[in-house]
Image: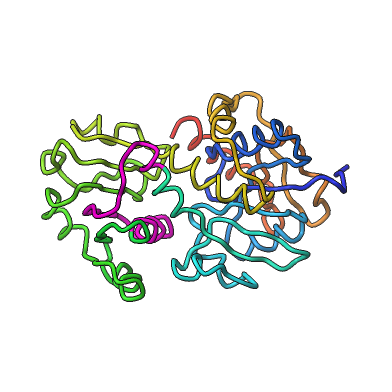
Amino acid sequence: MVEKSRKYYAVFGKPILHSLSPQLYNALFREERVNACYTRIHASTGKAVCEIIKALGLSGANITTPFKEEVIPCMDRLSPGASEISAVNTVINDNGKLTGHNTDPDGITGSLMEAGVDPSGRRCLVMGAGGAGKAAAKGLMDAGAEVLLANRNPARALEFAAKTGCRCAGLDKAAEKLKEFEIIVLTLPPGVFPFDPEQVSSDVVIVDANYRSPAGRGESHNFSGRIISGDRWLLHQAVGAYRLYTGKEADISVMEKGFNEKLDPDNLTIKTITRQSVPELIDHAVDMLVDGRNIDHKLIKEIIDEEKNKAFRG
């Protein structure tokens, strides 16, 4: 049974089994003796995410692809940052009232500053105008950088640029100007590297938002610049979320220990959310929950198989 005094958190996505967030937050909870636990939840829609947060009585949640924008209509309130970015990566549940926040700007600026790269005054290219891309552009602009936001569909970048004042362009146009930039931020899907590495100067800094990419989107493409991997972004955005969850400052060195805690593909604990079972599902042993409220057992199995494939063989 669930402990009434314990708080419960989760990261929502599709897919989600690959997420390292439970290792990071649970490491902090243990170290700081916070009576809380954190798991992963596979959901089908942004609306379902919000329903599950309430049904399971989660105190908070992190939101990742593809739900950062989808959850917005279900929020009772948005923080100013989440409203400007039009994306949510952290939700706080206050007795059924959901507030959406966005700590991703801290992810980009924190990872750069940690690496000794001050973005102030730098010419920056952000590739991808989804939730992570817009958050990166926001964080860089707030830090004093000059930003070009590029997207395959320029109209999506234009909408954000009109609100914030950054420049925007299509990916093809941005690729023609690569040598102009000192920092390039990739928020595109794993494996997508939409430019010729030879077009990039050797002293450019690339920040890859996706920590599932080979650290080496660059290496595998003979890229000679400096790469800041996505796990640094993950850590620094998690610091802001942990502050929202607990009111405490996170010790990054403790969170980093979580990166060494790998899931065993042959020894996973996966449970299904149904209309009959709610908070009893969550404990420290659960690696993932699957929203099975409106689907049959066959589809649930397909979801789990696909999650395993993407987490361990994708």
Q: Please tell me which residue lies in front, 33 or 276.
A: 33
Q: Nearer the viewer, residue 74 or 242?
A: 242
Residue drawn at x 42%, y 55% as measured from the top left: 132
Where is 83 relative to 222, above or below?
A: below
Q: Is residue 27 magenta?
A: no
Q: Quadrant of the N terminus?
A: top right
Q: Which residue is rendered at x = 50% and y = 70% of the image?
A: 83
| Apparent side of residue 314 relative to residue 302 in the rendered image (left or right) | left
Q: Which residues are magenta?
A: 111-140
How was the colour assigned to the protein in this rendering? rainbow
Does 2 sit above or below residue 285? below
Residue shown at 63% from the left, 39% from the top: 25
Looking at the rendering, which quadrant does residue 244 occupy? bottom right
As for residue 129 lying within the magenta part, the answer is: yes
Can you give x and y, in whole percent of width and height, for residue 47 in the image?
62, 66
Q: Residue at 68% of width from left, 44% of height from top?
A: 289
Q: Quadrant of the C terminus?
A: top left
Q: Where residue 156 appears, x then y in whole percent?
A: 33, 69
Q: Nearer the viewer, residue 300 or 161?
A: 161
| Apparent side of residue 103 relative to residue 125 in the rendered image (left or right) | right
Residue 179, given in percent of the width and then of the height, sits at 12, 48
Q: Is 312 in front, or is 157?
A: 157
